[in-house]
Each structure stands twice: as C-alpha cells, then as structure tokens.
Image (cartoon, rainbow, N blue to C red):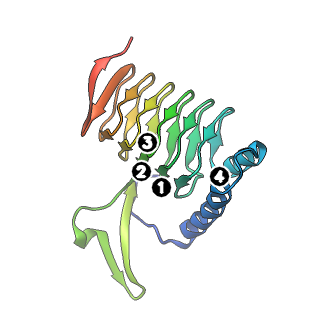
Amino acid sequence: MLQGDYYDSRDPELIEMYHNARKLLQEYNNLDSKLIEERERILGELFEFKGTGVWIEAPFFCDYGENISIGENTFVNTNCMFLDNNKITIGKNGLIAPYVQIYTTNHPLKASERIIENENGSRYLSSTQAVKIGDNVWIGGNSVIFPGVTIGNNVTIGAGSVVTKNIPDNVLAFGNPCEVKRELE
C-alpha cells in the first residue's frame, strides 16, 4: 500500500489498524479540552510522529493515524480529515484551517478495474501516494490536497483551494485547481 501498489482496503490487517484509530479518535474527540496531558498521550499513540507544541482541535478524523507525521508547533483546526492510506508529512509551524482534507488514496477510473467481485461481495481496488507539506505553511479552510502532492516551505494556500499538483516554496497559491498567484518574500 505504501509503495503505491493496488491494495484491498478491507484487508484484515488494515481493518485492525482502522479499528485502533477509531478507538483513539473517539477518545480524543470526546475528551475535555482541559485534559492536555491525555490529549498528548492519545496523539502520541495515534501518529507516527508528533512534534512538541502540536495542537489539534477536535473533532479530527483520519484513517489509520500511524502514517501521519506532524512537526513542532503546528496547529490543525477543527473538522480536518487526513486520509492517511499513505504517508502524510506536515512540517513545523504549520497552520491548517478548519475542514481541510488531505487525501492519499486513488482508485482506477474505470469501474471494471476498480470493482472486484468475489464470494464475499464487492471489493474496491485502491492505490496511494504520499503527501508532503513543508515548514511554515498555512492552508486555508475547506481546501483539499490530492494524493501525491508536495507543498513547499513558506507557502500560503488560499481557502477553498483544490491542490492537484505540487506547489513550490515561498508562494501564495489558490483556486480550483490551485495555481501559484505570486511569490512571497
């Protein structure tokens, strides 16, 4: 899966990872916001890496959690969804606004290649690509980051953007599809 090969998302090992993440997310999303040490413990169990000073507003959603790495002092606002079927790496000092969605999963376009019929019913083939977000990045609310995208350092992504391709360092980018609008000093 992490190499981008087709996989079945209902594989028993993945389902176990999914259930573990759901348990931790339920605990996190229902926790009193004053219980900082408990929030830290849960995020430490959920993520592959969490730097110091990371703050994630509840509710937060992800598939597995263990494919997510977030650098120090990054703030993730409410109702973000990180579908981490592959690695999602976010650098330090990031600002992720409400309702940002980060996807790592693709499916074949043709239904005949996407849907596998067997004795247990239908299964769906998926493939994945990692997402990388650099240091000091601000992603505006309701933005969607597509599989395989890399966003450079010191970037601002405008609200409502659909990021379908890589974004270089030190730029303001926005739109659907997201495009570089100007360089930032």
Q: Which amino acid is tagged 4?
A: Leu
Q: Which mark is residue 85?
A: 1
Q: Which amino acid is tagged 1?
A: Asn
Residue 171 image position (x, y, % from top left)? 35, 21
Whether label 4 touches label 3, CB < 8 Å: no
Q: Earlier in the sequence, mark 2 or mark 4?
A: 4
> What is the crowding at mark 1: few (fewer than 14 residues within 10 Å), some, or many (at least 20)?
many
Residue matched to label 4: 46
Q: Which amino acid is tagged 2?
A: Thr
3D distance between C-alphas at marks 2 and 4? 18 Å
Is 167 left or right of 47, judged from the image as shown? Answer: left
Q: Earlier in the sequence, mark 1 or mark 2?
A: 1
Q: Earlier in the sequence, mark 4 or mark 1?
A: 4
Q: Quadrant of residue 142?
A: top left
Q: Which mark is residue 104?
A: 2
3D distance between C-alphas at marks 3 and 2? 7 Å
Which residue is rendered at x = 61% and y = 60% of the image? Answer: 21
Please identify the residue farthest to the bottom as the structure is shown: 119
Image quadrant where one finds the C terminus: top left
